[in-house]
Amino acid sequence: MSQSPARNPLRKHAKLDLVQTVQAIDLFGQGVGINIAARAIDTTRKTMRGLYIDFRDRLSDPVFARWHRANAALVNVTGAEEIALIKSAMLELLAECHAHDTCYRNYRAGRRVDPICRACPLHGKFGSKDRDREAADAINALRGFYHALNIYAEPDRDPGSLLRARLIHMVTIATVLQNSRRLERSRCDPTQKTFLSFGTFRAVLVEHLLDHPA
């Protein structure tokens, strides 16, 4: 008589077992693209994409704030009013142009020198041309991060909330990687449990999944 699969405490409706789910957490926390991650744990790209998006959307919970609270540092400003302005402007402006990324794709492909096209809504919104460019660089960094993850359109998501989730995700992973000890093949050390390390992030995400299984 065959036994039922062991319950996965991290997922209510699990296509993956517990070991695979923990492996997916490790890959997510180190910014590994979903194509490579899916092959690594022997699952489909669709399943891995769903896991990454679920993990990503949890990062807005206050328990993860330590890893992304300084996300305005992307545009090199320090004043509280400026930080608030940059945050809100980035969200609003990218939400406006996020679905129309021809300029970014042309810039990435080397077909244009300036990331800001003449029709760009960033023009004049940050006080100077240099600030406009800093904002464009931050936006393009976000696009590049998701390109590297092999996650593209999310048409069912509100553009503003999608941008916020993606920005938090990018800054969180950057913070984890910058504060983690590396092992062989550049893997992060899961035994390091300092305040911003991969090991701590991994433990907090596992605890969040245990408390709020999807």
Image (cartoon, rainbow, N blue to C red):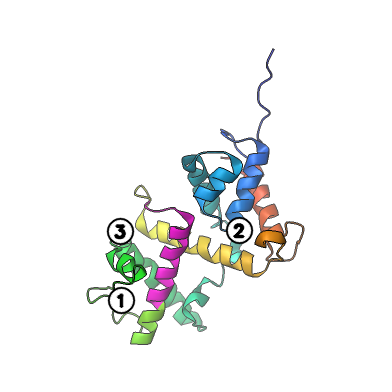
- For the residues labelled 2 and 1, the Cα–Cα distance comes to 30 Å
The residue shown at (40%, 70%) is: 139
Residue 211 appears in the picture as rendered: no
Residue 138 appears in the picture as rendered: yes
Q: Which SS class for mark 2?
A: loop
Residue 140: image location, x then y, percent: 40, 69
Residue 35: image location, x then y, percent: 50, 48
Q: Does residue 136 show up magenta in the picture?
A: yes
Which residue is at the far left? 119
Mark found first going from the N terminus, 3 or 2 = 2
Q: Which SS class for mark 3?
A: loop
Residue that numbered label 2 is attached to: 30
Callout in the foreground (3, 1) = 1
The residue shown at (68%, 28%) is: 6
Q: Residues within 10 Å of mark 2 (few under 14, many from 20)?
A: some
Q: Which numbered circle lies on residue 100? A: none
| Mark 3–mark 1 CB contact (< 8 Å) | no
> Which amino acid lies under the numbered mark 2 shown in the image of this protein?
Gln
187 relative to 137 in the view: left or right? right
The residue shown at (60%, 52%) is: 27
Q: In this picture, which residue range is highlighted in magenta?
A: 135-153
Q: Which SS class for mark 1?
A: loop
Residue 115: image location, x then y, percent: 33, 75
Work out whether 194 lies above or below 206. below
Residue that numbered label 3 is attached to: 99
Mark found first going from the N terminus, 2 or 1 = 2
- For the residues labelled 3 and 1, the Cα–Cα distance comes to 16 Å
> Which amino acid lies under the numbered mark 3 shown in the image of this protein?
Ala
Q: Which numbered circle lies on residue 116? A: 1
